[in-house]
Image: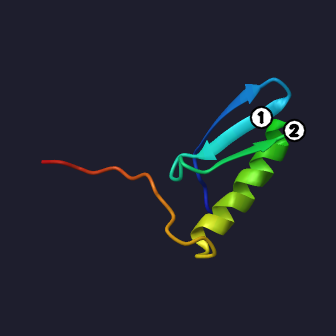
């Protein structure tokens, strides 16, 4: 099972969030559970190669 960290917030009736690895790609849901489903679909789309030129977030270790 793959795990992905995400950031989310509630704005009125909408639950909005993004995958931490892909902060440029927002999605929303009607509930937190619905948002998680949309985030899972988004993760699949972003990692499958279906979307070209995907921007990612990474960490660089410096000496």
Q: Would you say 6 lies left or right of 11 here?
A: left
**Which quarter of the picture shows residue 49?**
bottom right
Q: Would you say 42 lies left or right of 53 here?
A: right
* C-alpha distance separating marks 1 and 2: 6 Å
| Residue lying farthest to the left in this orientation | 63
Q: Which residue is label 2 attached to?
A: 30
| Nearer-the-camera pick, 2 or 51 | 51
Query: By what rule are the colours in the image chosen?
Result: rainbow
Residue in view at x 79 percent, y 52 percent: 37
Q: Is residue 54 visible?
A: yes
Q: Is residue 1 visible?
A: no
Residue in view at x 85 percent, y 37 percent: 31
Q: Would you say 9 lies left or right of 62 here?
A: right
Structural crowding at the residue carrying mark 1, measured as other residues with C-alpha within 10 Å and reported as few (<14), some (14–19) or many (≥20):
some
Residue 47 location (% of width, % of height)? 58, 69
Residue 8 location (% of width, % of height)? 66, 35
**Which quarter of the picture shows residue 34?**
top right
Structural crowding at the residue carrying mark 2, measured as other residues with C-alpha within 10 Å and reported as few (<14), some (14–19) or many (≥20):
few
User: Does dot 2 land on a helix, a strand or a loop?
Assistant: loop
Residue in view at x 67 percent, y 40 percent: 17
Which circle's residue, 1 or 2, is located before the other in the chain? 1
Residue in view at x 87 percent, y 38 percent: 30
User: Does dot 1 land on a helix, a strand or a loop?
Assistant: strand
| Nearer-the-camera pick, 12 or 5 | 12
Residue 44 location (% of width, % of height)? 67, 66
Q: Which residue is label 1 attached to?
A: 15
Question: Where 5 falls versus 1 (above or below)?
Answer: above
For the image shown, how many numbered marks are present on the structure?
Answer: 2
Image quadrant holding the N terminus, namely: bottom right
- The disc label shown at residue 49, or none: none
Asked if labels 2 and 1 touch by Cβ distance under 8 angstroms, the answer is yes
| Nearer-the-camera pick, 51 or 36 | 51
């Amino acid at each position: 099972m793959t795990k992905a960290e995400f950031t989310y917030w509630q704005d009125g009736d909408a639950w909005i969030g993004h995958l931490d690895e892909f902060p440029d790609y927002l999605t929303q849901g009607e509930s937190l559970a619905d948002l998680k489903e949309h985030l899972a679909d988004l993760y699949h789309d972003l990692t499958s190669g279906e979307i070209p030129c995907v921007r990612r977030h990474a960490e660089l270790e410096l000496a």
